[in-house]
Image (cartoon, helix red, strand yellow):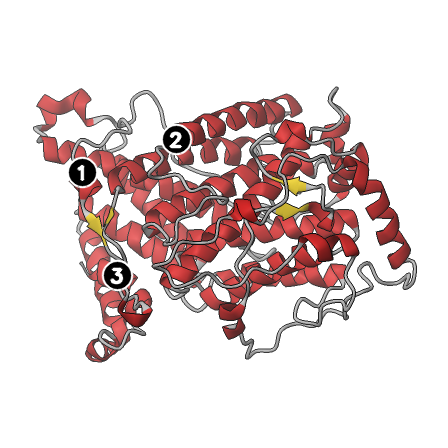
Amino acid sequence: MNAVLSHSVRWCKEEPQIGPLLDSFEGGAQFYQRAVSGLFESLKVGYASVPTIQTLLLLSAQECGKGNRTQAWLYSGMAFRVLDDLGISIDSRKYLGAAHLSDEDIEIRNRLFWSCYFWDKIVSLYFGRAPSMQHSRVSPPRIILDDTSEIEIWTPHGVSFPDGAHYPPTQAHSTSCFIQMCGLAETLNQILIYIYDPMRQSTEVEFFDCVQEQAKNLGDWWDGLPDYLKLVATDLPPYSPPSHIMTLNCLYHTVNILLHRPILCSRGLVKTRQESYDRSHLVQCMASATSILSLFDLYRRTFGDNHVVLSLAYSIYTAASIFLLEIQALKYAAPGTLDKLKFCIFALERVKVSNPVITTALRLVYQELQKLQIDIHGTMPAQPPNTEEQHHQPQPPPPHPTQQSQSPASSNPPRHISPGSQHQHQRQRSHAAMTTQPGTMIPEYNTFQQPVAGFDASQMGDMPQMPPTHLLGGMPNALMTVDDPGSYEITPEVFEAFSYAQPISTNMTSPFDSGWTGGHSQ
């Protein structure tokens, strides 16, 4: 219970009703101290149980958000060891009689195994480590029999809506969301092992086989996702669904980017294959990055940004990496791309208060901006390219949450268009602009400056609503959507430009903290 209270404090300590109550508990610090002391007292005498594992997982998640990588990694590792020690990593039905386990015991053990399995993949991704837990034929099944949490009504905590509006009654769908999240974690596990673990040194055949197989698995997962859990960026509801459903969808797009980005940026690997380029990898990355921004935009407009969990923030960081890649590859920063990149940075700046670990991610983004010589906080060009002026119009903030959101279909251009014919002209214009100032990659923008300590991200509330689609390089015919990735005639020159680009790290660890840099993606 102390671990639950300690983990929850950072989300509610600023609330007027909760803050004063925490004063007598040192702002909630006593809950953490009690949780840690109680944990080690039980471990010292050799007593471990299901609550021990739950406490270790909560402490790991709390330390992870703080940016305390060593503590987070050690707590999670202890949780997995205790899980094995208690036999929870084995399907309890196989020794039902010998262990005298009730149906409730089996249900709890199954949920706990998959909670550990999921957290193993997430914490490994965050900190650039190899996952330790693996699913096998003797593992507990990914089945939950007690689905009472599926039909419960979900209400946001600590969120005040204007003008007396209320969050509409919404079914939680917690059980189905958890099962789908664990299925997504199985795909992420394979991606981490075969693509992002340099210690394994996967062969080229293993690498491409993983991309092909997991792309199919990820597509099947998305196609099989129930409609009540699926969010499509071009057809979003006026309110954000429950936070766990939003997290599920953002995590899907994050995994999709992590799968396709290595192919997009691996010139050496691509050159050795028969197929010189595959446009779908670029489309998948761009469309997923744009979808993440649209989803997060809906989330923050509904709940604010004081309740953003770390996985949502990491999704924003991953999306930012794609827009940075576009600028790096095309040697041009389209206003629409800069708008999205600025949105990412403002979002990360605001959520780092509750998730200090994001500070490392922000540092990596700022370092990349410095390499590109872009001042993201500077003035936009007075005269952007005509194509962008015609097709990128900032959308006003959405109406009151009770009103229906504007349909994107009415304001977006046709979606299945080939950018191939437009790209060469756009490249020539970009090259001509660059030659005016030889020493600067993006000459229209001011020299990069690190943000001051008192960075004011309050202006994010006035930012326009993020469009659900993206124009690659600002080209009007280069609309990125995953509806039909094979319909784009992206020229080999565009794809080759991306193959030379170097993405920022997948993990939020300083270089001196870990030598794990992301395998083939780098």
Q: Could you tell me residue 235's position as x and y percent?
A: 46, 44
Going by the image, does 264 lie left or right of 169?
right
Q: Could you tell me residue 425's position as x and y percent?
A: 85, 45
Q: Nearer the viewer, mark 3 or mark 2?
A: 2
Q: Is residue 514 visible?
A: no
**Earlier along the polypeptide chain: callout 3 or callout 2?**
3
Q: Is residue 56 visible?
A: yes
Residue at the disc numbered 2: 134
Tag 3, which secondary structure?
helix
At x 27% / y 58%, what residue is drawn? 167
Q: Residues within 10 Å of mark 3 (few under 14, many from 20)?
A: some
Tag 2, which secondary structure?
loop
Mark carried by residue 108: 1
Q: Are marks 1 and 2 in contact (CB under 8 Å)?
A: no
| The N terminus, quarter of image | bottom left
Q: Could you tell me residue 135's position as x and y percent?
A: 36, 28
Q: Could you tell me residue 108's position as x and y percent?
A: 18, 38
**Earlier along the polypeptide chain: callout 1 or callout 2?**
1
Residue at the disc numbered 3: 36
Instruction: Give the image quarter of residue 139.
Output: top left
Mark 3–mark 2 Cα distance, whole angstroms, equals 28 Å
Going by the image, does 81 lie left or right of 342?
left
Nearer to me, 189 or 332: 332
Q: Nearer the viewer, mark 3 or mark 1?
A: 1
Q: How many numbered dots are placed on residues in this image?
A: 3
